Image (cartoon, rainbow, N blue to C red):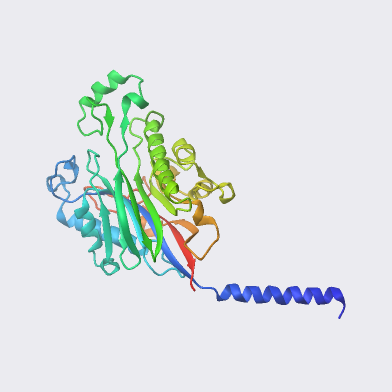
Amino acid sequence: MNFKKSVFLFLFLAAGILNSQAQEKKFKIHTVAFYNVENLFDTINQANYDEEYLPQNGWTSRKYKQKIHNLARVIVGIGTNDQQKESPTILGVCEVENKGVLEDLVKDPQIASKDYGIVHFESPDKRGIDVGFLYQKKFFKPTSYINVPLYIYRNEVDTAKKEEKDAEDADKPNVNYDATSKRVYTRDQLLVTGLLDGEEVHFIVNHWPSRSGGEKRSSPYREAAGRLNRKIMDSLFKINPNAKIITMGDLNDGTYNKSVKEGIGAKLKKSEVKKGGIYNPFEQMAKDGNATLFYRDSGDIFDQMMVSEPYIRNDFSGWQYWKAGIYNKQFLIQTSGQYKGYPLRNSPSEPGFSDHFPVYIYLIKEMK
């Protein structure tokens, strides 16, 4: 056998051995997800603007229970496939009225066996919709949680036609604005820290200010939300430069907007992410034409999940980001009519699912 053939045979055998070893490696996997559950209101009249979702306006106990059942059907399936049989270990949610609706949700027979715990705070949103955090107790143990308020004042971010707009808002008591203090009320950002199978991880759940009044006019509010999100992450990095952070939510902005690209500093490519940086896998998905919601026949990805740099180091001795997805099964999609192809949304007259598709990522870790 000549020298060249000997080298080739050695490389061939070595490659086979390495491939065999790689195939023998086994990984743990957890699904982390986010879902805008669209107006998850109970039937009880409370001190918020929930009149649309009350029995006298058609939102009955039967419809509320059907809405809960529909959402549980979605949750039990998010991220499941041939490789992952388990429902989400972690689920961030938004547009929930109170803790009670989350308690009803986790008791639904489809997901009751998952034994989800709940983290929830009432937010200052005048419609009474909040963010929340669900976790499977057997996998995740919270060690701390806090709601971080977003303080925005109209005279700081929008001076154009201020007096005219103040007068207009005074006639609309359901808007999230106080004409006296000039504060724009919106959802808090929820920070949860805990142990995922023994490893410390951090989650931030968001529902940023809406585009009410127009995208351009309302953009400064979401830019402020992006800066707050970054401030929370920087505070975690100051304590631990290797902090593993996942920020998720309905941002009411796309992956390309200033609030995400500059406020958070999210990057499209892993190679662009430096220490203390954030990777956004949903930016490429948006470029590929995917969507989590539709408006006027135009799709976009407002529901996003981003991970801090330690998640993309390919160090599988700890939890690492693997891949992301949008849960848009056929049963969640309108099949006819004007909104064919849109998410099968909810309304007081007909309990559907949501006007948003859930999103998720997989975390993996090598089993020893």
Q: Residue at point 32% right, 52% down?
A: 93
Farthest residue in the front direction? 239
The image position of residue 292, as x and y in percent, is 41, 49
Q: Image quadrant of residue 113?
A: bottom left
Q: Residue at point 58% right, 46% down?
A: 272
The image position of residue 130, as x and y in percent, is 26, 46
Q: Residue at point 36% right, 33% down?
A: 221
Q: Can the viewer see residue 42? A: yes
Q: Tell whether 21 sits left or right of 366.
A: right
Q: Can the viewer see residue 358? A: no
Q: Nearer the viewer, residue 58 or 230?
A: 230
The image position of residue 114, as x and y in percent, is 30, 67
Q: Nearer the viewer, residue 56 or 320?
A: 320
Farthest residue in the right direction? 2
The quadrant of the picture occupied by the N terminus is bottom right
Q: Residue at point 50% right, 58% down?
A: 323
Would you place residue 204 above or below residue 223 in this image? Answer: below
Q: Tell whether 239 sits left or right of 153.
A: right
Q: Image quadrant of residue 112?
A: bottom left
Q: Nearer the viewer, residue 297 or 264?
A: 264
Q: Nearer the viewer, residue 327 or 46?
A: 46
Would you place residue 144 above or below residue 180 in this image? Answer: below
